[in-house]
């Protein structure tokens, strides 16, 4: 018997008992559907996290003022204004850093014409945009010239632009921050949410010099709120954390036994942790799906065993007509595989419909990957072989004379 | 009537010159239940030539079913030698036995034993598929066989859509489709009424006389056995008569 004849036989056997074949298949359908959909959800979570990580810029660390704990009393971030422009300048001298961006920030009610909107205003230099790998959609960024001349210019995020100006072009328009007019010279490309879920486009950027002198005053001369720094390469991130800690301890005259009055946070390690969580989530979801696939496989085995017993006489007849043990084995194995592969195909289809539904009715974007389909498909065929083999072996091991006599 | 009367077929003489179809020498068969041995056949010696029409008779418990299973290569004797068409059966592997059943023997059973979900044409084609013939060719040959047996109009029907006599004719077509050396029929009329039984037995007689087909029938009914030309009578595992039907006392 060739492959197609065996398949035809298998389909014929299935069509004999449609309800049973359907119910058996249902186990595989649910199993494969669950695996494919769960993996797709896990994958989409991971992609989402990766996308957010990408918006942070690569090899980035953030240096925050105020120690995590101070003599047992925890102070909030920015409670102490311990970082200064000269700290930032000193850090920029370290060879491990390629870019260092000092930052001040504060939320303001901003207005343009009749519209107003609450957004965070950042005072930054050009390095900030370099580190974040952020460019404008329209207009241009400010540079050293605006910085030196303390210009009242602003670059706005897309959320701010949409809320203040709607459809009209913001370039050249004026916004008022604490009654001071700023001219918009650029609109940034949309970046989306960060790892914490905050909207990075709900922001207004002005030159650091302008911000420090006219908007965000401080008691400490030259103080800034935090520093964003980029290591020269991924390998130098750890060195950069160490070198910057050493440098700042020296500059702040912190004694050996004293705690840091600043925190260096390596965003890459945060990103790694987030990716680890996403991977664990994918594995967990995959494991849940796999369990239902396993249960489906056991269902196959169960039904195949019943089927072999029920068709003992048929097996005897086939053997009398010249079926070799291999033929009988192949027949029952093929039946199990056909059930599994058909169930797998329907399962993939259902998972696809599920992913479309999730994408439509939830904020998550779930896409079924080709590799996921192939894996689920070959997995279901494997389940068929694995759980079909024992019943098929039993059928093939029957003695012709006993099988023929079976009532 | 001696077996030689069926020799207008030069092929048969040729085949018989090479050796008999069946040679059973001291066949013994016992069933074991733990240490308990139940002997069923006590040394059966029978030789059957190509082209013979033989009936094996016996009461139930005489061992005729066991002998039939051994002859059909469905079971193996405990001791003794069985040569079928020149092959020593006890030396064959499982696969070779399957091949012998496929190529050399055509089975006809009491309960017809058709596969109920298959159209008649596919039932008849099945042995050809196991012989490695392609599906299209097997169906063609099966259809031809069914037409020859007068069932050409029922090719696509399922076994339960035709009468018992017709089902047995399908089974005979299936037995013939691989052009076997031997038809082995086990109570072929057991499930049929008298009229249909006569039809089926006439069909066997025609196959034997017109085509020189070797036929072996196992039965306990004298009315059926009398169609054969030679009788082998079994009693309690011993052969008590082996000779021409005409001389037997049925």
Image (cartoon, grey):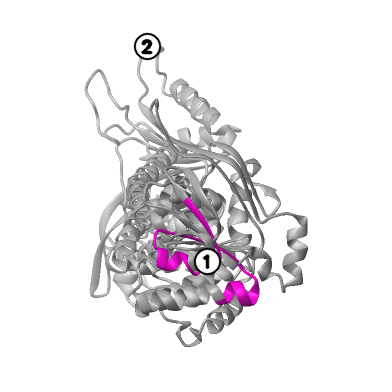
Task: Answer yes or no: is residue A142 visible.
Answer: no
Residue A214 is one of the magenta-drawn residues? no
Q: Quadrant of the C terminus of chain B?
A: bottom left
Q: Is residue B33 left or right of residue B137?
A: left
Give the residue at x 40% y 13%: A255
Q: Is residue A257 above or below residue A29?
A: above
Front residue of this view, candidates A97 and A171: A97
Front residue of this view, candidates A69 and A321: A321
**Residue A332: % across, % down:** 46, 55
Q: Chain of mark 1?
A: B
**Residue A5: % across, % down:** 55, 67
Q: Is residue A25 left or right of residue B98?
A: left
Q: Which residues are magenta?
A: B206-233
Q: Quadrant of the N terminus of chain B?
A: bottom right
Q: Do the residues marked 2 and 1 share a common chain?
A: no
Q: Is residue A288 left or right of residue B167?
A: left
- Distance between mark 2 and mark 1 Cα atoms: 115 Å
Of the numbered discs in the image, which one, if any, rests on residue B228? 1
Q: Is residue B131 above or below residue A229?
A: below
Residue named by callout 2 = A257
Crowd rating for badge 1 (residues with CA inside 10 Å; few <14, some 14–19, many 20+): many
Front residue of this view, candidates A392 and A73: A392
Task: Answer yes or no: is residue B157 visible.
Answer: yes
């Amino acid at each position: 018997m060739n492959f197609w004849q065996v398949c035809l036989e298998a389909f014929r056997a299935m069509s004999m008992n449609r309800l049973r074949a359907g119910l058996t298949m249902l186990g595989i359908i649910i199993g494969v559907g669950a695996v494919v959909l769960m993996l797709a959800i896990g994958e989409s979570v991971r992609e989402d996290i990766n996308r957010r990580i990408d918006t942070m810029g690569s090899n980035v660390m953030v240096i925050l003022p105020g120690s995590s704990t101070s003599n047992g009393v925890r102070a909030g971030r920015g409670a102490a204004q311990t970082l200064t422009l000269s700290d930032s300048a000193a850090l920029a001298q370290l060879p491990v850093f390629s870019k260092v961006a000092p930052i001040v920030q504060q939320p303001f009610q901003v207005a343009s014409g009749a519209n107003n909107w609450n957004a965070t205003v950042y005072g930054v230099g050009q390095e900030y945009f370099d580190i974040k790998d952020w460019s404008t959609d329209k207009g241009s960024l400010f540079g050293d010239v605006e910085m030196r001349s303390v210009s009242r210019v602003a670059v706005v995020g897309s959320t701010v632009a949409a809320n203040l100006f709607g459809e009209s072009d913001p370039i050249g328009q004026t916004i008022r921050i604490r009654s001071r007019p700023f001219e918009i010279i650029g609109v940034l490309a949309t970046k989306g949410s960060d790892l914490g879920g905050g909207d990075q486009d709900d922001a207004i950027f002005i030159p650091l010099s302008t911000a420090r002198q006219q908007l965000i005053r401080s008691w400490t001369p030259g103080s800034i709120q935090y520093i964003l720094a980029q290591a020269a390469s991924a390998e130098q991130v750890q060195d950069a954390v160490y070198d910057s800690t050493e440098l700042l301890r020296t500059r702040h005259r912190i004694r050996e036994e004293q705690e840091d009055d600043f925190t260096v946070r390596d965003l890459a390690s945060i990103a790694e942790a987030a990716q680890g969580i996403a991977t664990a989530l994918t594995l967990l979801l995959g494991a849940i799906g796999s369990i239902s696939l396993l249960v489906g496989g056991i269902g196959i085995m169960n039904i195949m065993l019943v089927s072999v017993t029920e068709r003992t006489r048929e097996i005897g007849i086939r053997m009398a007509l010249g079926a070799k043990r291999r033929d009988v084995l192949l027949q029952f194995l093929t039946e199990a595989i056909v059930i599994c592969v058909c169930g797998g195909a329907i399962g993939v289809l259902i998972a696809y419909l599920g992913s479309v539904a999730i994408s439509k009715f939830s904020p998550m974007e779930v896409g079924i990957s080709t590799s996921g389909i192939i894996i689920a498909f070959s997995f279901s065929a494997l389940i068929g072989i694995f759980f079909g083999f024992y019943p098929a072996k039993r059928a093939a091991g029957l003695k012709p004379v006993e099988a023929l006599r079976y009532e | 009537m001696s077996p030689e009367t069926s020799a207008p077929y030069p092929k048969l003489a040729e085949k018989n010159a090479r050796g008999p179809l069946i040679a059973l020498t001291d066949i013994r068969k016992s069933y074991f239940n733990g240490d308990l041995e139940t002997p069923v056949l006590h040394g059966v010696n029978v030789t059957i030539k190509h082209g013979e029409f033989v009936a094996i008779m016996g009461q139930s418990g005489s061992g005729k079913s066991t002998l039939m299973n051994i002859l059909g290569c469905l079971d193996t004797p405990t001791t003794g030698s069985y040569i079928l068409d020149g092959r020593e059966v006890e030396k064959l592997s499982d696969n070779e036995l399957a091949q012998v059943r496929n190529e050399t023997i055509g089975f006809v059973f009491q309960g017809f034993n058709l596969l109920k979900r298959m159209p008649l044409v596919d039932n008849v084609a099945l042995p050809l598929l196991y012989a490695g013939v392609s599906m299209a060719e097997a169906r063609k040959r099966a259809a031809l066989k069914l037409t020859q047996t007068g069932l050409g109009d029922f090719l696509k029907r399922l076994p339960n859509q035709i009468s018992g006599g017709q089902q047995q004719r399908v089974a005979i077509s299936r037995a013939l489709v691989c052009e076997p050396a031997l038809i082995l029929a086990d109570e072929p009329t057991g499930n049929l009424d008298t009229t249909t039984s006569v039809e089926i037995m006439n069909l066997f007689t025609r196959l034997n006389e017109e085509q020189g087909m070797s036929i072996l029938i196992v039965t306990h009914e004298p009315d059926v056995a009398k169609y054969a030309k030679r009788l082998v009578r079994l009693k309690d595992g011993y052969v008590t008569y082996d000779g021409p039907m005409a001389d037997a006392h049925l």
